[in-house]
Amino acid sequence: MYTYKTHIRFSEVDIDLHLTLPALMTEFQDCSIFHANAIGQATGNLRQEGHLWLLSSWQIIIDRYPSLYEEVELGTWAYGWRNFFGYRNFTMKDSDGKLTAYASTNWVYTDLATGHPARVPEEVRDLYGTEPPLDMEVAPRKIALPEGGKSLDAIPITKSDIDANGHVNNARYVAIAQELIPDGFATRQLRAEYRTAAKFGHVFYPTIWTVDDSGRTRIIVALRDHEQKTYAVVEFTGS
């Protein structure tokens, strides 16, 4: 397991001085980047070798959102491999060692020349190692879309949405989708499925659904293009 400690920064909190959901995702994402760098698998090294890890899906459980200045410990590890998929867990713990949030993710090992998935080499698996998975109920990678849904106004993709890989950053899809759900909605589980990379100049045409599952509300947002081809699906589940 790769771990490090940090503090919740002012740039990461909302009006109530609690960590935001997109900031939590960024913390987890950075943790994976630091882990890869520590074992010689930094993004630059991978690009030179002609490969890249692309995130396929998130499932994040939030017990609570830490406050400004609070010390937290981030942790991550690989827990499995299958063909071109790598599976990674994340944890965020408070100063007492109690989990505040944790996650399961699927990643795709990608050939830069073709843009297609590639089988994960044995030597890469060995570098990361494999540890037991976190004890959590893992949801399916794909998010089923209900019938119907409400179409919302188009959202142009801006330059600030784009990351070093040249497409919309994983956390930005969630931040954009979160802007479309009601204020004050307390997300306790976040699922995100990434289907097609969106780039600068593209436009999102969102569709939203609200589903009541035995008293628990789920809000699903599909971010699509003008032909209804899906870039990403984001599901927010309340308390």
Image (cartoon, helix red, strand yellow):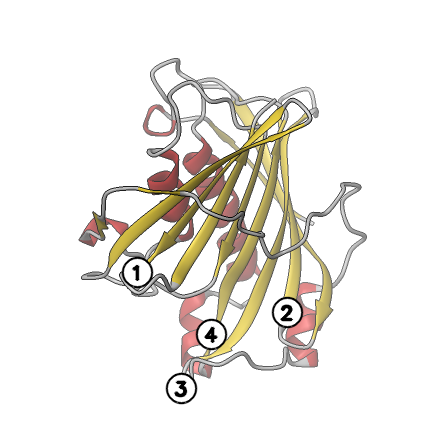
Considering depth in this image, is 189 or 14 the residue closer to the camera? 189
Q: Relative to residue 45, is residue 93 drawn left or right?
A: right
Q: CA distance from mark 3 to mark 4?
A: 12 Å
Q: CA distance from mark 4 to mark 2?
A: 16 Å
Identify whether 24 is placed above or below 94. below
In the image, which disc is placed on residue 113?
Answer: 3
**Residue farthest along the top direction in this orientation:** 16
Q: Position of residue 6 (x, y in %)?
A: 50, 32
Considering depth in this image, is 2 or 159 the residue closer to the camera? 159
Labelled pair 1, 3 in contact (Cβ < 8 Å): no
Q: Nearer the viewer, mark 1 or mark 3?
A: 1
Identify whether 159 is placed above or below 149. below
Labelled pair 3, 4 in contact (Cβ < 8 Å): no
Which element type, helix, strand or loop, lies under badge 2? strand
Residue type, label 1: Asp
Identify whether 107 is placed above or below 15. below
Residue type, label 2: Phe
Q: Nearer the viewer, mark 2 or mark 1?
A: 1
Identity of the residue drawn at 18% across and 61% down? 201
In the image, which disc is placed on residue 46?
Answer: 4
Residue type, label 4: Leu
Quarter of the figure that contains the C terminus = top right
Considering depth in this image, is 238 or 171 the residue closer to the camera? 238
User: Mark 1 sits on what residue?
Assistant: 225
Q: Relative to residue 97, is residue 45 drawn left or right?
A: left
Q: CA distance from mark 2 to mark 1?
A: 26 Å
**Which badge, 3 or 2, is on the more N-terminal residue?**
2
Q: Which class describes the residues within 10 Å of circle 4: few (<14), some (14-19), or many (20+)?
A: some
In the image, which disc is placed on residue 85?
Answer: 2
